[in-house]
Image: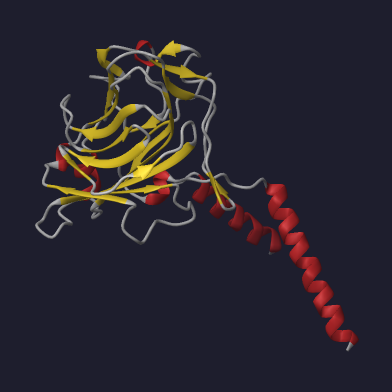
């Protein structure tokens, strides 16, 4: 009977661990080596990662304006909040010294149509960034090669949320070379006038979705239902690192954490059992 119970528990844990994303999900950890080659232009390689990336029309990162180079490298960015550590792979995307450069990659579906058909009205994204204090760069979810859609900009050490030509009323200062976990959420028609809302959080907790409004917020009327690609742009000669890109329909999709080794659970359970035994012995000794 005990064996059957343990077998059922193991099957349940395996189901949870292998749960697949039911709606929209796209991930690129720029795994190097693995998906990519060290010190190599990302646009000269087959696209890595997993999920809902296009495999036909634009199956890899594409260069729109090659003033510089985005290279995959073996160095990685990491993030820990409290006892939780973001799940990462080896490697990252590095913008080497060079002029105005844009790279983008298509999805194989429009995430909002895919997501909203399953009752969700939110689209989440996250990434790790480490930039120089003078970096001028941006990241956006867009539907074409134009600089439109929900996005953020890092300019002269300050992060701002951006939606087309509108910016958040405030900014968050970033320290030169420090790694930041940036979390974003796009909500359709959630504004007072039916506008779409972009919220962004800087270094949030990983254990649950933020409840309060973002550290940065901006509203804009935009047809987000036909967003079809992600775009990264660097507008000056300064370098920056970019890693662990995730886009999905829930917070848990874009903020997965490292699961402790089984030995940690064994130790924790064993320690708890010892504590319970000691308490019982003390009770009977009274």
Q: Can residue 198 be seen here?
A: no
Seen at 28% across and 11% down, the residue is 66
Seen at 52% across and 41% down, the residue is 79
Place of residue 55 in the rendered image (x, y in percent of width and height, measured from the top left):
30, 22
Seen at 37% across and 27% down, the residue is 134
Residue 216 versus residue 57 in the image, above or below:
below
Q: Residue 263 or 235: which is nearer the viewer?
A: 235
**Which residue of the protein is positioned furthest toward the bottom in this rendering?**
286
Q: Is residue 96 left or right of residue 53?
A: right
Q: Residue 21 or 102: which is nearer the viewer?
A: 102
Place of residue 76 in the rendered image (x, y in percent of width and height, measured from the top left):
53, 28
Q: Quadrant of the N terminus?
A: bottom right
**Which residue of the protein is positioned furthest toward the right in this rendering?**
285
Q: Is residue 126 left or right of residue 179?
A: left
Q: Residue 166 or 206: which is nearer the viewer?
A: 166
Residue 230 image-quadrant placement: top left
Place of residue 256 in the rendered image (x, y in percent of width and height, measured from the top left):
48, 45
């Amino acid at each position: 009977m005990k064996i059957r119970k343990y077998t059922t528990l193991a099957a349940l844990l395996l189901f949870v661990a292998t749960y697949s994303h039911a709606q929209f999900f796209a991930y690129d950890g720029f795994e190097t080596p693995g998906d990519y080659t060290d010190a190599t232009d990302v646009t000269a390689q087959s696209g890595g990662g997993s999920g809902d990336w296009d495999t036909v029309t634009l199956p890899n990162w594409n260069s729109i304006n090659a003033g510089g180079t985005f290279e995959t490298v073996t160095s990685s960015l990491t993030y820990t909040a409290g006892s939780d550590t973001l799940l990462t792979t080896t490697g990252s995307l590095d913008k080497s010294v060079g002029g105005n450069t844009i790279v983008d990659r298509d999805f194989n579906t429009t995430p909002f149509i895919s997501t909203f058909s399953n009752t969700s009205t939110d689209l989440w994204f996250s990434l790790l960034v480490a930039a120089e204090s003078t970096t001028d760069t941006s990241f956006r979810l867009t539907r074409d090669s134009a600089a439109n859609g929900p996005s953020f900009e890092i300019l002269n050490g300050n992060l701002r949320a951006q939606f087309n030509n509108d910016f958040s009323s405030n900014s968050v200062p970033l320290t030169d070379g420090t790694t930041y976990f940036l979390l974003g959420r796009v909500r359709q028609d959630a504004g007072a006038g039916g506008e779409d809302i972009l919220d962004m959080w800087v270094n949030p907790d990983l254990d649950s979705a933020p409840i309060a409004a973002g550290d940065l917020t901006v509203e804009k009327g935009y047809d987000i239902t036909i967003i079809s690609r992600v775009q990264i742009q660097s507008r000056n000669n300064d370098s920056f690192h970019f890693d662990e890109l995730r886009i999905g329909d829930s917070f848990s999709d874009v903020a997965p954490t490292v699961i402790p080794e089984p030995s940690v659970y064994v130790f924790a359970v064993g320690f708890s059992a010892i504590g319970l035994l000691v308490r019982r012995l003390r009770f009977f000794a009274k």
